[in-house]
Image: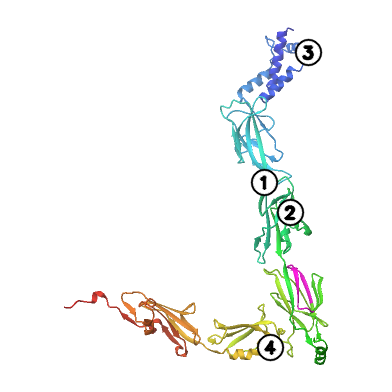
């Protein structure tokens, strides 16, 4: 077998192999494999003789068969498929590719050949990152590759799916395209806040502390973090430690090293639901307990006289005003008889136990105490510190009122209602426990409808005054006498006027219609003419005596004396002023 014919056979076999390739890259790889295969001349000769005997060689010694002829005919009838399309894989993004807009004709991802003019469609991306929920689909890039598989250029970048991603241009001369789905991680955003949460749930930012995120200092505000990294977030409130205390955090999983005034959180990168890191601080409160019983009492005049003779001092009996004072079960003081004690660094929610002798009572300023509990010869108060804007509380230990039955009795007034309230606004009613003698109470007397009350400290027809309970007991009869209740003076104020505007006042309050006035009450009216050209107001002698620039012939402001003569009358501004018609210049004629 000559060399020429063997070469022809090899070329024919190579042609058959190349017909099954998917791209120019695959062709080149196949060619290199054949060139390096080392086919022996003996094997070629045997194959030649076999094909010759089978009638598979033509006159030129080239391979031919009916199958080959049918394959060549079929290839000539269908599109060339000159562009090989490969689809890059992304483990975190699942996308299907199609030949049609209806997404019905699936493209083969491993052996796809298309022609210029063909269109590629894609389904909506399905994300499946098992590590971090912040992974998102970014875009699909369509890239042209050269004969060595390197990127020659990017032809398109598509972000909106599902839909078309690329149509191969009719004049496209390349041979390989690559479809690359890309994703990205969103930055993790967190908010850092140190706040004081007021009792009404509003918040105020606290600026003196320092946030640390992986050791770097930050203030209150927002940060963007790498979503794949764990973070240690801490808040140092050392500058607040003396007057403020830690009151909670969000999230509530933290490491609290209170001795260092540091609150630490660990940020899990897989949990993107936590975006706010909040530390709540609260100002400390204080509680002052005062001795209000005047505990130093001479026990015996004879001993006192002897003491003055020998020591010039009085022998006194000091009574404990506090048997026990505890905060959260920790004793602060017991057997206390001094003038005052102050508990500092009180927190909202602290449990207080105050035990005093049974014949004493605790009066609270700014604190609503529960009923006390009697135990043998002691009286106990147990309560929680409320969360208030100003946590400064004052308690006074005082002697209980010594009235025979120890209960409060209401006083009454004719044509009105008398009420007594404690300092917190709670009303004492018949049978209430008596206030202590030094305790402040608020007294009010409100007349019935149609009646007016007279006397000092009356405002808006109500008498109000603050006093000690002992003063109330001693003077209630006099207070009622000094504040008589009488029928009001009923008048109707008519503000309608065809020449001007009329307004009635009591103090700063404008009034009209039927009103109830008390005798001697300040009632004033203002009157203003509408048309200055027709009428003018005749001034009184008193008004004329005033400076000229104070009064106007077009406006008047006067005070009406309120007395019983006005009862059931109707008052109009014009009843108290006099108008006259102005003389116009045009009405004057010259005479000679």
Q: Secondary structure at mark 1?
A: loop
Q: Which mark is residue 187?
A: 1
- Residue 74, image x, y percentages: 64, 23
Task: State the extent of the magenta-drawn residues as a range.
Answer: 337-354
Residue at numbered disc 3: 40
Cβ atoms at labels 3 and 2 below 8 Å apart: no
Give the Cα distance between marks 3 and 2: 77 Å
Depth check, mark 2 against mark 1: the one in front is 2
Main SS, magenta residues? strand
Which residue appears at 65% of the width and 66% of the height? 200
Q: Quadrant for residue 234, please give it.
A: bottom right
Q: Quadrant of the N terminus?
A: top right
Asked if 469 appears above or below 83 in the picture, the reply is: below
Which residue appears at 68% of the width and 88% of the height? 409
The disc, 3 or 4, on the residue closer to the chain's N-terminal end is 3
Which residue appears at 19% of the width and 76% of the height? 590
- Residue 543, image x, y percentages: 38, 82
The disc, 2 or 4, on the residue closer to the chain's N-terminal end is 2
Residue at numbered disc 4: 409
């Amino acid at each position: 077998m000559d060399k020429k014919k063997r070469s022809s056979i090899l070329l024919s076999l190579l042609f058959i192999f190349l017909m099954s390739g998917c791209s120019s890259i695959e062709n080149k790889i196949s060619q290199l494999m054949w060139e390096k295969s080392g086919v022996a001349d003996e094997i070629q000769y045997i194959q030649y003789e076999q094909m010759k005997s089978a009638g598979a060689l033509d006159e030129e010694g080239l391979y031919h068969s009916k199958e080959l002829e049918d394959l060549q005919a079929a290839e000539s009838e269908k599109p060339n498929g000159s562009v090989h399309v490969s689809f890059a894989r992304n483990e975190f993004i699942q996308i299907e590719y199609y030949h049609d807009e209806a997404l019905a004709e699936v493209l083969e991802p491993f052996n796809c050949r298309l022609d210029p003019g063909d269109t590629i469609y894609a389904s909506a991306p399905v994300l499946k990152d098992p590590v971090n929920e912040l992974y998102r689909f970014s875009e699909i890039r369509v890239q042209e590759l050269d004969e060595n598989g390197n990127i020659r250029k990017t032809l398109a970048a598509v972000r909106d799916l599902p839909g078309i991603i690329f149509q191969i241009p009719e004049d496209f001369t390349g041979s390989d395209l690559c479809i690359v789905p890309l994703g990205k991680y969103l930055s993790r955003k967190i908010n850092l806040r140190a706040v004081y949460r007021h009792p009404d749930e509003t918040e105020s930012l606290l600026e003196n502390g320092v946030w640390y995120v992986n050791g770097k200092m930050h203030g209150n505000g927002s940060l963007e973090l790498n979503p794949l990294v764990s973070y240690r977030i801490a808040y140092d409130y050392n500058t607040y430690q003396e007057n403020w205390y830690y009151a909670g955090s969000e999230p509530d999983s933290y490491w609290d090293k209170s001795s260092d005034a540091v609150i630490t959180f660990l940020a899990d990168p897989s949990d993107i639901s936590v975006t706010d890191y909040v530390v709540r601080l609260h100002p400390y409160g204080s509680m002052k307990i005062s001795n209000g019983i005047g505990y130093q009492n001479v026990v015996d005049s004879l001993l006192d006289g002897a003491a003055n003779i020998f020591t010039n001092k009085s022998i006194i009996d000091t009574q404990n005003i506090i048997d026990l004072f505890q905060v959260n079960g920790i004793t602060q003081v017991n057997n206390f008889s001094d003038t005052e004690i102050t508990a500092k660094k009180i927190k909202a929610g602290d449990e207080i136990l105050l035990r005093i002798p049974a014949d004493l009572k605790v009066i609270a300023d700014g604190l609503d105490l529960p009923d006390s509990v009697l135990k043998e010869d002691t009286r106990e108060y147990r309560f929680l510190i409320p969360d208030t804007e100003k946590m400064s509380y004052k308690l006074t230990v005082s002697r209980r009122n010594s009235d025979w039955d120890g209960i409060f009795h209401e006083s009454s007034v004719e044509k009105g209602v008398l009420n007594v309230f404690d300092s917190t606004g709670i009303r004492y009613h018949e049978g209430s426990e008596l206030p202590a003698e030094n305790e402040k109470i608020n007294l009010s007397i409100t007349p019935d409808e149609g009646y007016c009350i007279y006397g000092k400290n009356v405002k808006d027809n109500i008498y109000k005054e603050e006093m000690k309970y002992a003063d109330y007991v001693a003077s209630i009869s006099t207070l009622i006498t000094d504040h008589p209740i009488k029928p009001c003076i009923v008048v109707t104020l008519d503000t309608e006027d065809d020449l001007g505007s009329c307004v009635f006042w009591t103090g700063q309050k404008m009034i009209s219609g039927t009103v109830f006035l008390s005798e001697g009450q300040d009632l004033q009216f203002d009157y203003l003419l509408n048309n200055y050209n027709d009428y003018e107001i005749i001034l009184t002698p008193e008004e004329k005596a005033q400076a000229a620039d104070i009064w106007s012939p077009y406006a008047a402001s006067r005070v009406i004396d309120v007395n019983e003569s006005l009862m059931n009358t109707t008052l109009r501004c014009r009843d108290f002023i006099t108008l006259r018609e102005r003389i116009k210049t045009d009405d004057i004629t010259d005479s000679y």
